[in-house]
Amino acid sequence: MRHLPNVLSLGRLLATIPLVVLILVNTPAAYLIATALFAAGSITDTLDGRLARRYHLVSNLGVFLDLTADKVFVSAALIALIQVSVIPAWIVIVIVTREFLVSGLRSLAAAQGVVIPAGRWGKQKTLLTLLAVGGILLARGLRGATAFPLGLATGGAPTSPPGYLLALADIILLLAVVWTIFSAVEYLRGAWGLLTAPAKSAP
């Protein structure tokens, strides 16, 4: 039990490799397997943190693995979906840029002995992104196709449940982009005092 949270985080990190491969295979069967793998990874995203807090198993290694696995797992899936022309690059650029921004702010805060907690917009953004990616994978596995603006998955107007599912997932992904921007602003506001404070002189 003591190492279970870290094992779950490490498993999610390692699962990134087969997840990306399955997306790049770009067949309905591969997408269905990718959906199951992504769903399992998304569940462990919540489970490992809860187990660590409930049983007082929080450690520096655990925090590092959890944060790293979260970012790599989702970012890799999004980038792979660009490769197969399912989602446009601009969406992933916005989402990944926010991750770099938050990581930079947290590093700066940590150097000053300050902890920046996860914000409300960030938590909601994560949920929306997971739902969107999972929905896209499932819809593609069910042979869903739909015409959608802004460079999202194309293939004609939705005429079947998988097509409507894909359209819904695309809409959720666009909402995730909006929440991503709001989350970035939230972090910037919270860390503005650190950003505007004079730099400490080296001893």
Image: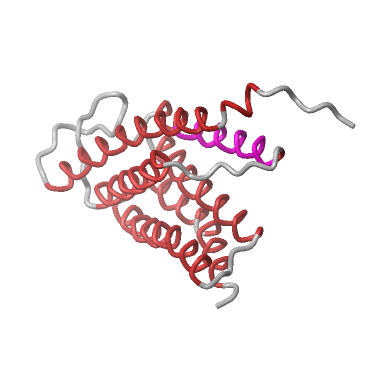
Q: Main secondary structure of the magenta part?
A: helix
Judge whether residue 103 is colored magenta: yes
Q: Residue lying farthest bottom?
A: 1
Judge whether residue 126 is colored magenta: no
Is 16 rendered above or below residue 168?
below
Left or right placement of residue 20 versus residue 28 in this view: right
Q: Residue at x 51, y 65 (%)?
A: 53
Describe the colour scheme in one phrase: secondary structure
Left or right placement of residue 34 versus residue 167 in this view: right
Q: Residue lying farthest right?
A: 203
Residue 191: x and y in percent read 57, 31
Where's the N terminus, which quadrant?
A: bottom right
Residues rendered magenta in the picture: 95-110
- Residue toward you, 31 or 10: 10
Is 93 rendered above or below residue 24?
above
State how many labels appear. Answer: 0
- Residue toward you, 104 or 187: 187
Residue 148: x and y in percent read 23, 29
Q: Residue at x 63, y 29 (%)?
A: 194
Q: Residue at x 56, y 70 (%)?
A: 56
Residue 187: x and y in percent read 50, 33
Residue 72: x and y in percent read 53, 47
Q: Residue at x 53, y 63 (%)?
A: 11
Where's the C terminus, which quadrant?
A: top right
